[in-house]
Amino acid sequence: QVQLVESGGGLVQPGGSLRLSCAASGSIFSINAMDWYRQAPGKQRELVARINSGGSTYYVDSVKGRFTISRDSAKNTVYLQMNNVKPEDTAVYYCNVNVFTTKSRRGDYWGQGTQVTVSS
């Protein structure tokens, strides 16, 4: 089994910053991609950012230039640095990690979600 623990959400004013963390633990052989998703009330969950095992990154257009995804492979942890946040960034943020639990067995695991609220 693999467990993901998220932290770092909260209330922040527009233009402010937050850093989210997601630590994976358990039966981990290796980790492939690490993602951050978000879901706002009444909207579908969307992929915000991805970092693969080689360090390549992807960002949804709405966060480019403001958010930065990074990973610490030694700690099996992925981060999302959120700068210049906007009210439309308000959502529950979830990490998703693609994990090899053995050489050949792979699965996707989700964090519990952390609320980010951008408001003055």
Image (cartoon, rainbow, N blue to C red):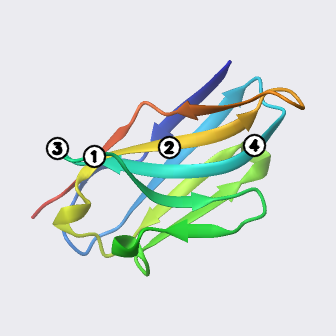
Q: Mark 4 points at which residue?
A: 31
Would residue 79 appear left or right of 107 to someone viewing this image?
A: left
**Dot 3 and dot 4 residues touching (CB under 8 Å):** no
In the displayed structure image, the side of residue 70 where residue 100 appears, left or right: right
Badge 4 element = strand
The kind of residue on which mark 3 rests is Pro
Residue underneath mark 1:
44
Where, by quadrant of the figure, is residue 13 drawn? bottom left
Q: What residue type is labelled 1?
A: Gln
Instruction: Identify the image quadrant of residue 14.
Output: bottom left
Residue 17 position, x and y percent, is: 35, 67
> Total marks drawn?
4
- Label 2 to label 1: alpha-carbon separation: 15 Å
- Mark drawn on residue 41: 3
Where is residue 63 drawn, in percent x and y?
38, 72
Disc 1 crowd rating (10 Å Cα; few below 14, some 14-19, many 20+) is: few
Q: State the quadrant of the C terminus.
A: bottom left
Mark 2 neighbour density, 10 Å: few (under 14) some (14–19) many (20 or more): many
The residue located at (55%, 51%) in the rendering is 35
Query: How far, Cα to Cα, is label 2 from label 4?
Result: 13 Å
Q: Is mark 3 on a helix, strand or loop?
A: loop
For label 2, the residue is 95
Q: Distance between the residues labelled 3 and 4?
A: 30 Å
